[in-house]
């Protein structure tokens, strides 16, 4: 049997154990993502008062229109009742923002982190 890959018997045991542990803690990727989203970190403060502790997406605006936004080359649809969180003025290309998504994956709210 020359040319066949030889493995130690315990290698398969370790790999299957690691896979089993990861499946035990996170049997469904979406479920884990949801669980992480709602975890509050002890000692952490929001970026600004009234802001969420975590955003689903952070990035710079490439383009913003009535129905969609492009953030870091990713196109996202806006929900019908999207909320804009900016103290004064309007969002513009290059602004650093945080996004919260609704369960349908559409943008529910846009938060200004730093103006361009």
Image: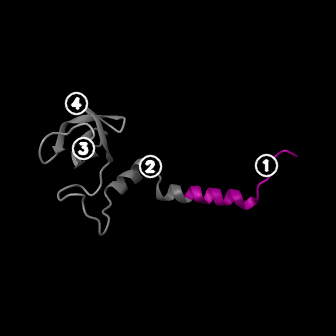
* Camera-nearest label, 4 or 1: 4
Q: Which residue position is annotated with label 3?
A: 116
Which image quadrant is residue 59 in? top left
* CA distance for labels 1 and 3: 56 Å
Question: Which mark is first along the chain, 2 or 1?
Answer: 1
**Which residue range is magenta in the image?**
1-20
* CA distance for labels 3 and 2: 35 Å
Residue located at (17% from left, 59% from top): 49
Q: Residues within 10 Å of mark 4 (few under 14, many from 20)?
A: few
- Cβ–Cβ below 8 Å for labels 1 and 2? no
Question: Which mark is first along the chain, 4 or 3?
Answer: 4
Asked whether 81 falls inside the magenta stretch, the response is no
* Residue 78, horizontal then vertical, whole percent: 24, 35
Which image quadrant is residue 104 in? top left
* Camera-nearest label, 1 or 2: 1
- Cβ–Cβ below 8 Å for labels 2 and 4? no
Question: Which mark is first along the chain, 1 or 4?
Answer: 1
Q: Main secondary structure of the magenta part?
A: helix
Question: Which mark is first along the chain, 4 or 2?
Answer: 2
Q: Quadrant of the C terminus?
A: top left
Q: Which residue position is annotated with label 2?
A: 29
> In the rendered view, would you say 69 is above or below 11?
above
- Cβ–Cβ below 8 Å for labels 4 and 1? no
* CA distance for labels 3 and 4: 18 Å
* Residue 36, horizontal then vertical, whole percent: 36, 56
Residue located at (59% from left, 59% from top): 18
Q: Which residue position is annotated with label 4?
A: 65
Q: Which mark is residue 5?
A: 1
Residue located at (29% from left, 43% from top): 103
Q: Residues within 10 Å of mark 1 (few under 14, many from 20)?
A: few
């Amino acid at each position: 049997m020359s040319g066949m890959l030889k493995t130690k018997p315990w290698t398969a045991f370790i790999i299957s154990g690691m896979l089993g542990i990861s499946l035990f803690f996170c049997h469904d990727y979406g479920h884990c993502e949801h669980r992480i989203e709602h975890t509050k970190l002890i000692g952490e403060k929001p970026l600004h008062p009234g802001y969420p502790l975590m955003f689903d997406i952070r990035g710079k605006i490439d383009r913003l229109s009535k129905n969609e936004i492009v953030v870091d080359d990713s196109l996202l649809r806006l929900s019908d009742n999207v909320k804009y969180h900016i103290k004064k003025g309007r969002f513009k290309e290059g602004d650093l923002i945080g996004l919260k998504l609704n369960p349908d994956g559409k943008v529910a709210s846009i938060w200004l982190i730093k103006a361009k």
